[in-house]
Amino acid sequence: MKIKIFYAAIALSITIFLTIAAVNERVEPQKTNKNIIKFSHSLHKEIAECTTCHTKAAESISLKDRLLPEKDACATCHDVEDTDKCNTCHYEDVNEKLIQKESELIFNHKKHVIDQKMDCIVCHKGIEEVDYAFQSAAAFPKMNQCASCHNNQSVATNNCETCHISTVNLIPQDHQQVNFMKSHKFSANAENAECQMCHDNDFCETCHVSTTMITESNTAKDFYVPYSPHKFIDNTKQQQLSRVHDLNYRFTHGVDANNKSSECQTCHQVETFCAECHNSASGDFSMEGTMPASHRKSNFVTIGVGTGGGLHAELARRDIESCTSCHDIQGADPSCILCHVDNDGIKGTNPKTHIRSFMSDQDGDWHSDANSVCYTCHRDANARPNGIKGVGFCGYCHK
Amino acid sequence: MKKLISLIILMPLIISAQNINGRFTSSVYSFERFNDVNNSETFFRTYQTLNLNVNYNKFSLRTRFNFESNIGNVLDADPRTRFYNLYLEARDLFNLVSIKIGRQPLITPVAGGLFDGINLKIKYSGFSLMGFYGGNVPAYQKFELIDDISNNYVLGGRFEAYALKNFRIGISYFDKNFKPLDYYAERLNENLDLVTVLIQTKSNQYKYLSADATYNYNQILDVNTRYEYDLNYKETSRIEFDGRLKATKDMGINFYYNLREPKVRYNSIFSVFDYGNSQEIEGGIDYNVSNLYTFVLKFGDVKFGSEHSSRITMGANTNFGSLSYRKTFGDIGELDAISVFAARSFFEGFITPSIGITYSNYKLSKYDNINSVTSFIGGLNLRPWRTFSFDFQTQYFNNKIYKNDLRLMFKINYLFNTNI
């Protein structure tokens, strides 16, 4: 039954997807103004201002306005009454209106040309060097050109809605590449990185947040869903609550966490984030709470020197970060120390913890610091800085 | 008093500003919480967020804070005000120096996050040197400075050279300290009598040196590498390689490798255990069918000692949404998941409906049973004005824990920009 539901869901999803895809498909016109009229911007650059021909551009407040020259504008210089000269500009039997591309941008020429007193070629770069506008790669400004002012710094906001009619589909091509989630850390560091064109100064920390000073515990009474206010700020995908992970990720994230296919700590501070859900009323993880299924296995913990520790030791060796995600809450969870403790200081009589030759070639901090983590477990009477050689903890190394 | 002083310092900046811009967002989100198997409560949690930039020439004041509370069922720590950042920024002073002071984000190749402190960057002729120092941010981003900065701080820097064409190299140092809370625990003394002891450990620490290099050739070949060295344990912490080749105009091939030692803080109780590293390898292809469609396919494998886990991901990214299928298999958990999200604007952005559906079968470990989960979101954005909009969204979950769980969200956005 479940497999039928699964395939039904796949079929439904694909159907919806393709339906919306079909609605969104647009056929770009292949024909250009080069096929309609003979014209050269470079030939006209010395003899006319831009607004001589593009008469409505300076006063325009919308890209829906028709900004290309009409015949009357040409007639101010060209004798359009002389039918023998039609082919000066027109191809034979081609008398069509110029093609103006549709735009999904909101742009106010008047505000920029008249109010800000900007020259046309500040944005339409290189247009005076070519015949047709499309022949200059910079004739229609790219976003980084706009971002030189729309940067939240000088005169204009970079809120996406200011210029874009819709914000749901503003995804740069490189964000759609197969490796983007892993490579963005490299590209974001590039000298010419343009992340800030779309992302606010606070965008990075929505994931790379690192709150570490926990001074209070999260009780069951204080627990709520979701603990993710960053999902409620506005980015380009304003409507999509689940942006990075799939909608069902709350339930399936254990697969990624186990597999280390994502490094959760990059975005989530484990002491706060994981504990929010994997918590218990008492705050003692060793006694209750949302416990992984593995912890309920009969051999999860085996007690006694030589038993190997059981399943938990195997799991911890493979992925200790999964242990820390619940248990290392600022040192306040004593689960490990219930067993991993050495009271007699006699080597070989306590649960094995360290790898072979652990710290043997280093001058460990237990020599000088009474707060060393070593003394959490090694608690024989001689376990202290400058202890007596050959006795208890110190006797591990100093015979 | 602290807030008053802050206000006095900040007010002249605001009054003399040339440009003020930002965004205000107000939202409410409903959810149901089960206190036990048979009893549940419905909560309405509200969030008020202000994102504000105040600018004067090369100087800016930037902040974002969030005020949250419940309507009705008040939580213990409500209301909460979180200051995600609040800092002064001066850019390109003498075309050489940039400086940030206050609560600010820190993004470095080694580690990142928020901190309260100072960040200074000097940039000259293809080289840059950056240094930072400050205290950790208190839990829940409270508008407070931590008391014990000597045990709770970040310190580091980065040197970067990008003078050579297409090539960049950086060296970073990062030292982050945390002082764990003291706590009482039951222990046995030398006579095996039960005693209560106060466990006090000193500041835990991450301390890394990192080098990274990037080569890019005409947007055809990208090679990124990173190496991290753990100064506390005196061993390699990470080796990472990311390569991308634009094989044809429309097709890219990617390769990724990662060797990683678990990040366990020095002087944490976990730091003394015997644990292993993981190796991850991944390869993928993306292909642009047109400007509207990109198909992706990738395969990854993660190895832990003798065990390993594999995954396959395939799907399409488009201008109107995404479709993906993912399968995970191997020694550590299984997953089959399909996800689709789509949105489209009508009437020049006035109305934008969206829909998202996922369905998954999963088994979190070999000790678990197979479970399934269905989730759905349906949303509507209304934008009667460019600066003012409303969002509605409903979320539905169904799995063994959340049976027919329905949640609702409503949000109001207002953005502003004023040149004075």
Image (tube, rainbow, N blue to C red):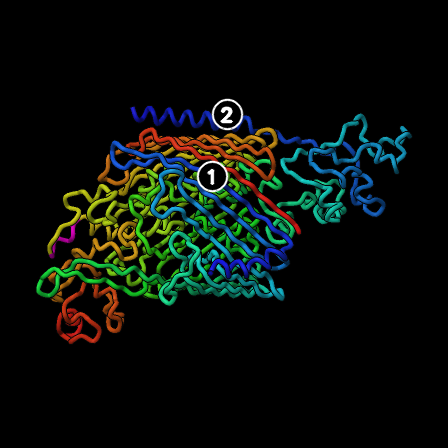
Q: What residue sits right under mark 2 in the picture? A: A19
Q: What residue is drawn where x is 46% and y is 49%?
A: A183
Toward the viewer: A71 or B21?
A: B21
Residue at figure coordinates x 49%, y 41% from the top left:
B26
Q: Is residue B111 magenta?
A: no
**Which residue in the protein does label 1 denote?**
B27
Q: Quadrant of the N terminus of chain A?
A: top left
Which callout, 2 or 1, points to the residue nearer the camera? 1
What amino acid type is highlighted by mark number 1? Ser
Q: Chain of mark 1?
A: B
Q: Chain of mark 2?
A: A
- Residue A338 lies, with reference to residue B379, above or below; the image says below
Residue count near mark 1 (Cα–Cα under 10 Å), binned few <14, some 14–19, many ≥20: many
Q: Say whether residue A361 is visible.
A: no
Contact? badges 2 and 1 (CB < 8 Å): no
* Badge 2 element: helix
**Residue B336 position in % (x across, y down):** 34, 34
Camera-nearest residue between A385 and B226: A385
| In the depicted structure, whether residue A328 falls above or below residue B390 | below
- B208 or A92: nearer the viewer: B208
Give residue A240's position: percent from left, percent from top: 47, 37
What is the chief secondary structure element of the magenta stretch? loop
Q: Name the kind of residue labelled 2 in the image.
A: Thr
Q: On the rendered image, what quadrant is the C terminus of chain A found in?
A: bottom left
Looking at the image, residue B187 lies above or below residue B39: below
- State the extent of the magenta-drawn residues as a range: A305-310
Asked if residue A268 is positioned above or below residue B360 in the image, the reply reads below
Q: Where residue A265 sits: x, y (%)?
A: 37, 51
